[in-house]
Image (spheres, rainbow, N blue to C red):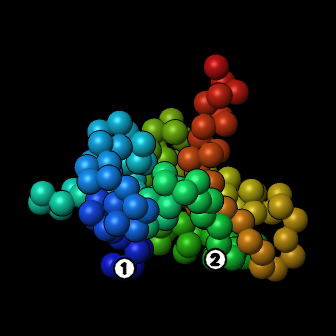
Amino acid sequence: MFLYDVVTPAEIEKMFSLPAGSVRRDIKRKLFRRSEIRKSGATWLITLREAKRVYQGYEDKIQVKKDWNWVRNYIDSELNPVLEEEIADFLDGAPFERIYELYFDAIEGIGIEDEGEYLSFVEWFYRFKESYETTEI
């Protein structure tokens, strides 16, 4: 994640023409994914893709490769402590390695030959987790 891929509540409110205080209210309402926000001192930092997801219905897609090393490196670059914790909780004792296999299987499942567009790992994980929890109930 790059420095310029992170925005503050004030920047988001300006970007999306939202009333002052809207973002902080939505943080309290838990509209943002925990792994996509964090507080630095008194300031909330939010990934731009998360702001777009919440306020524009943005679907984060990236160019992917059907290549095991690429998948591992890409997922590792997306991990942060909160996301790692959420993945570990979801895996419920299964080896962490399993998450790489699941994302690789998802990429394979879309039928790309070499490179194609697919959901970013973070977007895929939350959707996969939600669909899994929904079918388990």
| 92 or 136, nearer to the observer | 136
For badge 1, the amino acid type reads Tyr
Q: Quadrant of the C terminus?
A: top right
- Bin the neighbour count of mark 2 within 10 Å (Cα to Cα): few under 14, some 14-19, many 20 and up: few
In-image side of 55 versus 115 (left or right): left
Which one is closest to the eye, mark 2 or mark 1? 1
For badge 2, the amino acid type reads Trp
Q: Gap in Å between the C-alphas at discs 2 and 1?
A: 24 Å
Residue 50 horizontal/vertical position (percent): 46, 58
At 70% from the left and 27% from the top, the residue drawn is: 135
Q: Quadrant of the N terminus?
A: bottom left
N-terminal of the pair, mark 2 or mark 1, is 1
The image's mark for residue 4 is 1
The image's mark for residue 70 is 2
33 shown above or below 121: above
At 64% from the left and 45% from the top, the residue drawn is: 128
Quick check: can you spot residue 137?
Answer: yes
- Quarter-of-image position of residue 80: bottom left
Secondary structure, mark 1, is helix
Secondary structure, mark 2, is helix
| 6 or 67, nearer to the observer | 6
- Bin the neighbour count of mark 1 within 10 Å (Cα to Cα): few under 14, some 14-19, many 20 and up: few
